[in-house]
């Protein structure tokens, strides 16, 4: 499987086989986590791998929604830094998720935004550490009931309804969404397949002056109220990671550049959108 196939095949899995992964696979995962690409080197990133204690209810302990059954392991990634920390975290954690799928391992993010303090206390993290979401992983349950449960929960989380690229991509102005040009299509499709909390899919793209601008919707009803609205940043990072990995597979060059609101030259856009980053693919 190449990484593009892994992006396409990745699905949030909620029911796992109980047995732990072999040690050599866990070592490979540690290597993957250690070599993930940063969105910005200004932030410090670390990942801790933990085994799930039998019977432990991770969702109850650390936030999130829904139900997961017997994940054997999870990763807590955290960022310390001021430069778009949740975007950078989503960017790095999604690279890990895709590379795990490439090893035949299933994953699911479990959001912890409302519970970041509890997570810091539990894992003895610095007060500035942003955790956003943790990543459970293992082999998927392969029994019929396991597969059915995964499909049912995914449908309940509306994970199977992904917006097509033609509703995300805009050319020149935000007047009307349209189909991306052929040379960008696979890369943008990869972004559209990214996971997002409650499948909110907050990202929108604008092609302007040979540059792709990434925006997020400021308000997303699927996230709920208060701090959960910040999932848009983590989700945008995951979206950008999928696009970066797809560009690698397509032998395209280009690097995401984070935008500041003070940046001159951000193209006109509706007030409901917030500009996060730009990319000049070549
Ligand atoms: C930041 C984040 C938090 C998430 N939190 C949860 C969660 O708490 N419980 C859950 O079942 N799924 C969670 N998910 C998975 C989403 O529901 C899933 O990505 C979405 O429905 C799309 O489905 P897919 O990942 O299978 O493509 C989360 C995903 C992200 C990116």
Image (tube, rainbow, N blue to C red):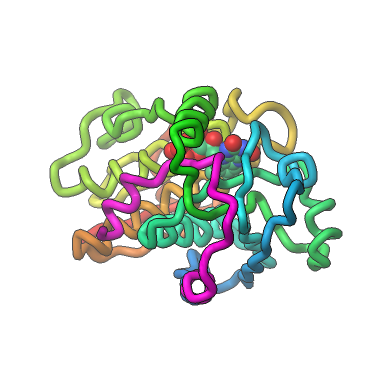
In the rendered structure, which segment of residues is drawn in magenta?
A: 1-30
Q: In the picture provided, is 128 more to the left or to the right than 88?
A: right
Q: At x 21% / y 43%, what residue is drawn?
A: 185
- Residue 246 image position (x, y, % from top left): 28, 56
Task: Judge by depth and name the residue closer to the eye, 19 or 190.
Answer: 19
Q: Is residue 2 magenta?
A: yes
Residue 196 can be seen, yes or no: no
Quarter containing ligand 1?
A: top right
Instruction: Decide: is 170 above or below 130.
Output: above
- Residue 258 image position (x, y, % from top left): 48, 58
- Residue 117 image position (x, y, % from top left): 83, 52
Residue 78, quarter of picture? bottom right
Q: Locate the C terminus and report the quarter of the image it occupies.
A: bottom left
Q: At x 36% / y 39%, what residue is drawn?
A: 192
Q: Is residue 35 magenta?
A: no
Q: In the picture provided, is 70 more to the left or to the right than 185?
A: right
Q: At x 70% / y 57%, what residue is drawn?
A: 130
Task: Judge by depth and name the residue closer to the eye, 118 or 183.
Answer: 118
Q: In the picture provided, is 183 more to the left or to the right than 239?
A: left
Instruction: Residue at the far front: name it.
Output: 143
Q: At x 79% / y 45%, what residue is drawn?
A: 61
Residue 177 can be seen, yes or no: yes
Residue 224, quarter of picture? top right
**How many numbered markers are drawn?**
0
């Amino acid at each position: 499987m190449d990484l593009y196939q892994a992006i396409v095949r990745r699905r949030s899995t909620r029911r796992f086989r109980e047995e732990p992964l072999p040690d050599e696979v866990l070592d490979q995962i540690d290597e993957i986590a250690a070599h993930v690409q940063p969105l910005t080197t200004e932030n410090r990133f670390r990942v801790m791998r933990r085994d799930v204690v039998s019977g432990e209810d991770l969702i109850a302990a650390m936030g999130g929604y829904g139900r997961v059954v017997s994940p054997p392991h999870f990763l807590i990634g955290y960022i310390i830094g001021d430069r778009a920390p949740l975007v950078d975290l989503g960017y790095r954690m999604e690279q890990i998720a895709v590379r795990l799928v490439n090893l035949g391992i299933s994953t699911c993010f479990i959001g912890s935004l409302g519970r970041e303090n509890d997570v810091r206390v539990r894992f003895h993290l610095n007060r500035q550490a942003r955790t956003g979401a943790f990543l459970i992983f293992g082999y998927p349950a392969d029994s019929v009931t396991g597969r059915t449960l995964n499909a049912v929960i995914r449908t309940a989380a509306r994970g199977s309804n992904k917006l097509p690229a033609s509703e995300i991509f805009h050319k020149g102005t935000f007047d009307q969404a349209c189909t991306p040009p052929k040379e960008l299509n696979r890369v943008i499709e990869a972004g559209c397949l990214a996971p997002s909390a409650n499948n909110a899919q907050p990202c929108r793209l604008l092609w302007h002056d040979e540059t792709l601008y990434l925006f997020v919707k400021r308000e997303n009803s699927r996230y709920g109220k208060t701090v959960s609205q910040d999932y848009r940043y983590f989700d945008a990072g995951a979206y950008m990671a999928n696009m970066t990995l797809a560009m690698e597979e397509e032998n395209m060059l280009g690097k995401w550049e984070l935008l500041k609101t003070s940046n001159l030259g951000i193209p006109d856009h509706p007030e409901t959108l917030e500009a996060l980053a730009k990319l000049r693919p070549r």
